[in-house]
Image (spheres, helix red, strand yellow):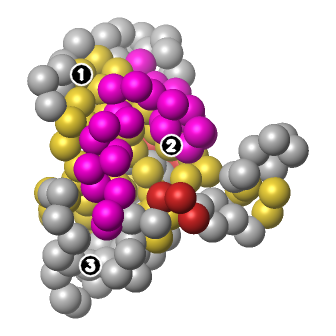
Amino acid sequence: MLFTCQKDDFELVEQNNSNKYPDIHSQILSLDEVQQNSKLQKSLKKISNSFDINKTKTKNKTSNPNSNLGSNSKIDANDGSFSILTDEILHVTSNGGEAWSFKIETPLLAEATFENFVITDNGEEIKFFLYSYITLEYNGEIWHFVISVLPIENEPIDVPCN
């Protein structure tokens, strides 16, 4: 099951108590909480050469004076191809593993409505992906469809040209 980072999608899943999907739990985390996750630290370090993680950019300071993050915080890809927004990180757990989904500031694919940077942990390995979605209206309902999944490896990110 895929969960997207659009606000309306968060409302479809009750946080940590879903009657429709009892084995799936979700919560919104901060970047600080994600970086403190001991399982992710080694994997985040592996891809840190592709991202400017230590220079998180922020537009507005949070109400927590001890935090170096603010609303609209983001991490830029070192090649300038995209920015990962870090003010709302969706963390989803299930009996199949867990995932962290970050919004991308501006889609890389011209045909994409929105994109997410996703970290997955199936219990054996941690992987990184860039998911691209298109939003369509069908029978009066809004639907989000995956149109591309780009694996992100340890080497610099090779983003397709538009």
- 8 displayed left or right of 144: right
How far is mark 1 from mark 2, CA to CA? 17 Å
Task: Identify which residue is drawn at 39% across, 71% down.
Answer: 77
The residue to which callout 3 is attached is 109
Figure check: 61 above or below 38? below
The amino acid type of the residue labelled 2 equals Ile
Quadrant that contains the C terminus: bottom left
How far is mark 1 from mark 3, CA to CA? 28 Å
Which dot marks residue 89? 2
Which dot marks residue 97? 1
Q: Residue 50, position in %: x, y?
A: 31, 66
How far is mark 2 from mark 3, CA to CA? 21 Å
Quadrant that contains the N terminus: top left
Mark 1 or 3 closer to N-term?
Answer: 1
- Outermost residue toward the bottom? 162
The amino acid type of the residue labelled 3 equals Leu
| Nearest to the observer: residue 96 or residue 45 | 45
Task: Identify which residue is drawn at 38% across, 36% down.
Answer: 41
Mark 2 or 3 closer to N-term?
Answer: 2
